[in-house]
Amino acid sequence: MDFTIPSEFANLRNQIAAFVEANLIPLESDKASYDDHENIALPLLEKMRAKARAEGLWCLQLSPEHGGRGLNKQAMAVCYEAMNRSIFGPVVFNSAAPDDGNMMVLEALGTRAQKERWLAPIANGDVRSAFAMTEPHPGGGSDPGMMLTRAERDGDDFVIHGHKWFITGAGEADHFILLARTSDDARRGHTAFLFHKDDPGWEITRRIPIMGPEEHGGHCELHFDGLRIPAENILLEEGRGLKVTQTRLGPARLTHCMRWLGLAKRCVEVATDYADRREGFGTRLADRESVQIKLGDLAMRIEVGRLLVMKAAWEIDQGRYAQKEISMAKIHVATLLHDAADTGIQINGARGYSKDTVLEWVYRYARQARLVDGADEVHKMLLNRHLAEQGSEFWSWDVGA
Ligand SMILES: Cc1cc2nc3c(=O)[nH]c(=O)nc-3n(C[C@H](O)[C@H](O)[C@H](O)COP(=O)(O)OP(=O)(O)OC[C@H]3O[C@@H](n4cnc5c(N)ncnc54)[C@H](O)[C@@H]3O)c2cc1C
């Protein structure tokens, strides 16, 4: 593998880094920058988005046809990491979950008409979107085979009944991708539908309170009681919902990792800054071996995470799903993010536990990383399936084969 970053992408990364440093980091320490759910306040977001757009730093992940720069996954890894040096970064560049993953799947699988209707307004920053799959017990969570939400055909329409929860961004979203059962077939029984928030027959019954800061629109519980969706709003084909899910969740898991690496680096930055200037018992913290070991360990684990992410990105860029590589990256980086925030807080002492730095924000946010888009245990179970199938070929180096 060639680890050289083409100068075009390196320049873009530098431009993003300069934008984050000049425009976003200063906002983080001002209480007025935040909404009630600890994310960037919407009027300020619009202002920052306009600025990012004017500098050509908008929706880089999409093709030029859809207003982006056509970055491949390797280039995205480089750029997304730089974006998430700030907790406000990804959403300002229109590269935050869930819109990021929703736009990528619409671009990959939507018809021309669907892209015009459902993708273009998200890519343009006019509306937000949500992806509705998870259900409370006894419905589908880690195991999509347990999904209970049903779509019954009625003429040219499908009528939806069911219950979803933890749907990120639903409170602010206009465009929804919904997974429902159209038959009991294990492999071809799920279908992905597109609907608009104003379509009748569904409602948000609750914005679920969570321990961490929230994406705009929160994490909501949805009830469907007769939502009617025309067949033309099926994404891909009837019965191909699991394929849509695979296409949506694989790259979205990886872009989570790209962003989380940026956040983990920020935790190290805040820790290093304090350790360099804080003294106790006649010694700077930075000169203590115990502190050096903590920071050295994080530096190594961040680099391991970057290698896992880059390998998975490279696999996807070769046209493969990279399921195994994405699972490994997701497990590693989710745990790393948590530990980077935890160590950052420990090195900063009481200051780390305060709201004077972003560490406590990242710490609370990081706990979800080991659950969203597949819990650690599920990814490990999947890795073991690959191991059982491939034996020692699991570690094959011929990644291009
Ligand atoms: C902040 C947040 C945002 C989210 N956003 C969305 C969204 O936008 N759209 C959406 O559809 N969903 C969303 N989710 C849901 C998320 O994808 C699910 O929480 C996740 O898939 C796990 O499903 P579950 O919560 O039903 O856990 P369950 O399936 O109930 O599993 C519970 C626990 O059991 C363990 N477990 C499960 N399977 C195995 C196994 N095979 N082996 C060993 N242990 C196992 C794991 O520890 C797991 O955490 C979000 C969740 C959170 C927390």
Image: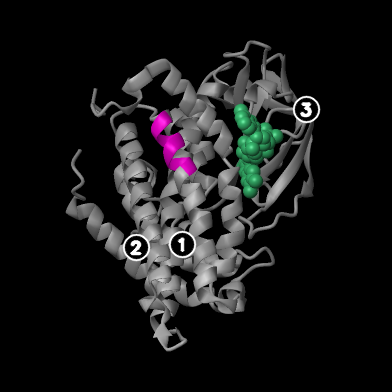
Task: Give the vertical position of 155 relative to 47 (above or below).
Answer: above
**Residue of label 1:** 89
Query: N-terminal of the two: label 2 or label 3?
Result: 2
Asked if the residue under mark 2 is in contact with the one under mark 1, i.e. CB atoms within 8 Å, the reply is: yes
**Residue of label 2:** 16
Q: Nearer the viewer, residue 300 or 330?
A: 300
Location of the C terminus by quadrant is: top left
Helix, strand or loop at label 3? It is loop
Asked if the residue under mark 3 is in contact with the one under mark 2, i.e. CB atoms within 8 Å, the reply is: no
**Residue of label 3:** 138
Task: Please say whether residue 99 is one of the residues in the magenta stretch.
Answer: no
Q: Amino acid at mark 3?
A: Pro
Asked if the residue under mark 3 is in contact with the one under mark 1, i.e. CB atoms within 8 Å, the reply is: no
Q: Amino acid at mark 2?
A: Ile
Give how far apart the Cα atoms at labels 1 and 3 are. 37 Å
Q: Nearer the viewer, residue 378 or 209?
A: 378
Q: Which residues are magenta?
A: 324-331
**Residue 122 percent location from the top left of the image:** 51, 47
**In the drawing, what numbered circle is on residue 282?**
none
